[in-house]
Amino acid sequence: MKKKVIIIGAAGRDFHNFNTYYRNKKEYEVVAFTATQIPDIDDRKYPSELAGELYPEGIPIYPQDQLSTLIKEFDVDECVFSYSDVHYEEVMGVSAIVNAAGADFKLLGPKSTMLKSKKPVISVCAVRTGTGKSQTSRKIIETLLEKGLKVVAVRHPMPYGDLVAQRVQRFATVEDLKKHKCTIEEMEEYEPHVDRGNIVYAGVDYADILEAVENDPDGCDVILWDGGNNDFSFYEPDLSITVLDPHRPGHELTYYPGEVSLRTADVAIINKIDSADEASIQIVENNIKKVRPDSVIVKAESKITVEHPEMIKGKRVLVVEDGPTLTHGEMTIGAGTVAAERLGVKELVDPRPFSVGTLIDTFEKYVHLGNVLPAMGYGKQQLNDLEQTINQTDCDAVIIGTPIDLSRVIDINKPYTRVHYDLEEVGSPNLKEILLDFVDKYQLKQ
């Protein structure tokens, strides 16, 4: 008898778990995916072109709130939890729903889902969304490029559109972002790489992506896994780096699967020490030593620069921050807010009275948000709502704290300035020392 399975996810890890573990196993029948966190991805299908010959009709995707009903309707044997940055209480809450409906609750680990590359792999993961993975990845790439190495980044999946078309995506220019119809969340991750002339891959099928990366026409000496949320790597790393955030001390031991990333880290980076208090930094450091005592601890500052600081001092400003960091990352501030406070802002304008459409729903759902506007842009409607909200907000200027040039995708009718942030390690050990050892160990050309 085949085991009937539901994969519980959010358009990323769920598809990878299916592709690597279930797709070609005749002893299982995946009857459905359920979706949460990301708007407008339920009520679709995982297409037959990706699902394989055992699933000629594809696999339906349902909202997660139908999970209990689906388990009974399909007589499901097991449900596999497959998304990230979730508090342990919430994970076990889902397990209670699954068990109460009669099914087993399952978590797949690295051994079942990681793919092995022919190239050396460095993974950059985190214990929460918004800790500073992207700036860490950029620093690693820049350091390796200085050694004459060709580095290709592979980003954790964000396939919210045509899944067949997104099977394997290669980004080399800003024009590629338009070609692939990227959302703001995707652009926030890809654009900083391509701006620096670096190649980035992403998509749906990470075995096919790996083959493409290893045979990239521009060459590849090292693969950098650029993680998403607090998920662990899809590729088996030869050097695993995990970033921690002292603005959320203790979260490294209470969110799934971030603690997995910490417990498997060769290098643990405590970021943002320039804007966190010493007591919180110490809590994070103590927790690293408690669960991963053999890891190398690196301390770093998130250095913030502002293109036009004169637009901030003494002004009433609207701060637009990275969406996922504020929403399911549960942060109340981001780099834009830190920059505003350091430069003597007069007032952080509350965007709520000016919000429209889906952004009203966002503020109602994420009640922890302060006077900041999350850059939500998963689809055309959210982009329109973001543009309208910004343009009708009563303020002197707008601070763009997202990693992308927001003015390239929406029209902003008032003065604005961008905030940039980069990783800067404090003292030793540091990434340059660690990466030089890595280059020597794998005898990479220089």
Image (spheres, helix red, strand yellow):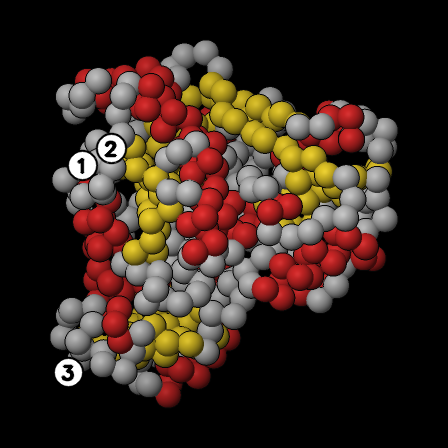
Q: x%, y% of residue 167?
A: 30, 60
- First-in-chain label (3 vs 2): 3
Q: Secondary structure at mark 2?
A: strand
Q: x%, y% of residue 323?
A: 59, 50
The front one of 65 and 140 is 140
Badge 3 crowding class, 10 Å Cα cut-off, few under 14, some 14 to 19, many 20 or more, is: few
Of discs 1 and 3, which sits in the foreground? 1
- First-in-chain label (1 vs 3): 3
Q: Which amino acid, by three-letter code, is at mark 2?
A: Val
Kindly tell me whether residue 264 is visible in this rendering.
Answer: no
Cα separation between marks 1 and 2: 6 Å
Look at 73% across and 26% down and name the residue there.
309
Instruction: Place residue 431 in its image quadrant.
Output: top left
Cα separation between marks 3 and 2: 44 Å
Say the numbered circle drawn on residue 444.
none
Q: Which residue is situated farthest in the front direction here?
A: 175
Per the image, the residue denoted by label 3 is 1
The front one of 423 and 131 is 423
Up the image or down, 68 lies above or below 411; here it is: below
Per the image, the residue denoted by label 1 is 119
Q: Quadrant of the N terminus?
A: bottom left
Look at 27% across and 58% down and name the residue there.
205
